[in-house]
Amino acid sequence: MTENQTREARETSSLRAEVRGWLDQNWDPEMSTREWWERLAASGWGFPHWPADHGGLGMTHAASAVVVQEMVAAGVLGPPGGAAPTMGAPIVFAYGTAEQRRRWLPSIARGLEGWAQFFSEPGAGSDLASVQTRAVRDGDEWIVNGQKVWNSGTMESDKALLVARTDVDVPKHRGIGFFIVDVHQPGIEIRPIKQMNGSAEFNEAFFTDARVSDADRIGEPNQGWAVALHVLTHERASHPGGGDGVLKQVHGGERAGYLDRPAGQVMLEADDERTANRLPISDLDSLLALAREHGRLDDPVIRQRIAHLHAFGESLRLTQLRALVSTSEVGTETSVVYLGAVRLVRLYRDLIGDIAGAAALLDCTDVSDSILTAPCHGIQGGAEQIQMNLIGERILGLPKEPQIDRDVPFKDLRVGTQRVTAAAASSNGST
């Protein structure tokens, strides 16, 4: 072992001991989730990679991963989860003003607000730059009209990240604005989308003269594309497909209903919080339990496939850690991890079905839920094909695909021209 490796090992060991000591003194499963999150936020252990002057400890992502590992080992509830810390906080740090950081980061760290995401549209899925939802300036506010779809967790959220068209006279990538909008206002109607697994994790939202303050705009009015790309990079990193050693987390905000309940009880229920990016059977223990239940644990082929899943999951975890150590930031490498996670989910799905056999068609619990939830992977967080493009262009250095609409004003594009032109001509921006 080299001198540097020896020093790093000592530092890691010291960090682990420090985290364990703090958790031993502060974790109490009987305290409310609100109080626990307040302790994590005040100490900086909740989001240790955040800057020290904004509630963190200024650690690298690699060191933060060590903190998470100790939380998992100690069996404690993690800091607030969801879009607010995984997508909202990174763009507030990268593009927000000092006033926006002071206003939003403390509530995110303490889980006082839940956030969602208004990105995808019926006519702009993988091609996010083709969004047609309009935001028209009206003094110190923007008036928003349009439709969003496949929004996750919107019902329980207080705010949402919104991408909207602010200028139709320039090419599509240059006329986009990025906002933080209050979800529950008269101008926003949210409709749940019933999924084949029986849940309604996703929603669609309709904007009719909804309003957002200009003070809640992130970045310049027509330069929201760069902000959106930053969010998408972090979104890919927040969609792991499953595996062992997962930190127990739930969404923040009053609407989620966790703040004033005992933290220990909430932690036990964390796996039951239905989210689109987690299969009920998605770790080694639950897979072994399923094989044991169906008398397949002694089957050498099944055992080999379980071992393969475990090895694949570990290699994926180590790949993500290696990327964090080498860059200290979330980057394009998340596309590699994302695609690996999609493959991991499908391996779980196939093995679960093979273990349960015909019972998978009749079982209406974790087996069928896992199989029916799996197809959303490879779509949410960015389509597989888009991730492959990113890997090819930004990691492998392959030439970009031809794009004939990059320099065409958005109002002149054939797709959606009628709707966009009508929106531009309307005095209030209605679509």
Image: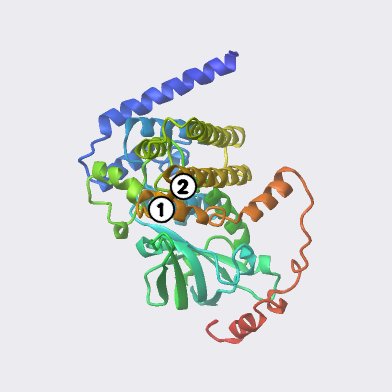
Amino acid type, label 1: Ser
Q: Residue at x 35, y 37 (%)?
A: 43
Q: Residue at x 51, y 56 (%)?
A: 376
Q: Residue at x 34, y 27 (%)?
A: 20
Q: Residue at x 45, y 44 (%)?
A: 352
Residue highlighted by disc 1: 368
Residue highlighted by disc 2: 353
Looking at the image, the residue that sits furthest to the left is: 30
Across and down, in percent, residue 129 comes to 64, 65
Nearest to the observer: residue 47 or residue 155: 155
Residue 105 appears in view:
no
Residue 41 appears in view:
yes
* Quarter of the rendering occupied by the N terminus: top right
Assess whether mark 1 and mark 2 are in contact (beta carbons under 8 angstroms). Answer: no
Total numbered circles: 2
Nearest to the observer: residue 81 or residue 212: 81
Nearest to the observer: residue 246 or residue 235: 246
In the image: residue 192, left or right of residue 339: left
- Label 2: state its secondary structure: helix
Disc 2/disc 1 C-alpha distance (Å): 8 Å
Across and down, in percent, residue 18 comes to 37, 25
* Quarter of the rendering occupied by the C terminus: bottom right
Amino acid type, label 2: Gly
